Amino acid sequence: MKESFDLLIVGVGGQGTVLASNVIGDACLIEGRTVRSAETHGMAQRGGSVESHIRIDGKYGPLISKGTADLIISFDLLEALRYRHFLKDGGVIISSESMVMPTSAFTQGLAVPSADDIKAGLSDVKLITIDAAEIAKEAGSILSQNIVMIGCAAHHLPLSKESLLKAVRDLVPPKTIEVNEKAFELGFLKGI
């Protein structure tokens, strides 16, 4: 019997995956819940893949095994496809519709699958996609896409909306609190 809620947050270096995992972790602490997390940064500074494993209410280490994630939050559609094998049967992937061309594909002139091809490759799972970049712009800053994604995912997390919003307020720079609150709320509306 599984005792934890296993979450994987994936993206490309610079998209804010680590801040997003810190927000989730802080929300867990606000609620007095056990949380374990670990990040793998890879070539984050060069546009490489970044993953954050988060285990809520578990008693074992933070790394999530393949086929056991309850939820994957992906900041990039290609990353959703790359990490799909971590999702358990009946799990959910919430992904931004944006795609960052991998450096290796760019430098070698390789073809990158289209968004439709990627969505077709994920047709066997529950996939929710949103235009996080456009929503972040509406909130006031393109840099708030990670908070938009947390807002959208809030419906699938075992944490209260209030705890997640408090964690956002606690962790973003003070001058960006208002924008990030709006980003969370707009993402939350898209996740319904």
Image (cartoon, rainbow, N blue to C red):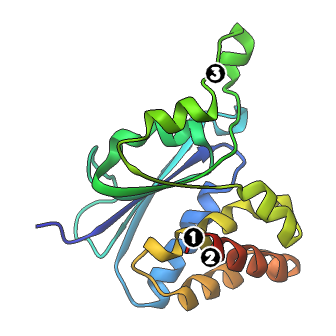
Determine which residue is flagged by label 2.
188
Q: Secondary structure at mark 1?
A: loop
**Left or right: 108 in relation to 52:** right
Q: Are marks 3 and 2 in contact (CB under 8 Å)?
A: no
Quick one: quadrant of the N terminus? Answer: bottom left
Q: Secondary structure at mark 2?
A: helix
Identity of the residue furthest to the left in this view: 1
Residue at left offset 68%, top offset 67%: 148
Q: Are marks 1 and 2 in contact (CB under 8 Å)?
A: yes
* Front position in the image: 52 or 131: 131
* Front position in the image: 24 or 136: 136
Q: Residues within 10 Å of mark 2 (few under 14, many from 20)?
A: many
* Front position in the image: 138 or 28: 138
Of callouts 3 and 2, the N-terminal one: 3
Q: Secondary structure at mark 3?
A: loop
Determine which residue is flagged by label 3.
112
Q: Amino acid at mark 2?
A: Phe
Q: Amino acid at mark 1?
A: Gly
Mark whose residue sits in front, 3 or 1: 1
Of callouts 3 and 1, the N-terminal one: 3
Determine which residue is flagged by label 1.
191
Residue at left offset 55%, top offset 86%: 161
**Left or right: 67 in relation to 79:** left
Quick one: quadrant of the C terminus? Answer: bottom right
Residue at left offset 62%, top offset 44%: 76
Name the disc covering residue 143, or none. Answer: none
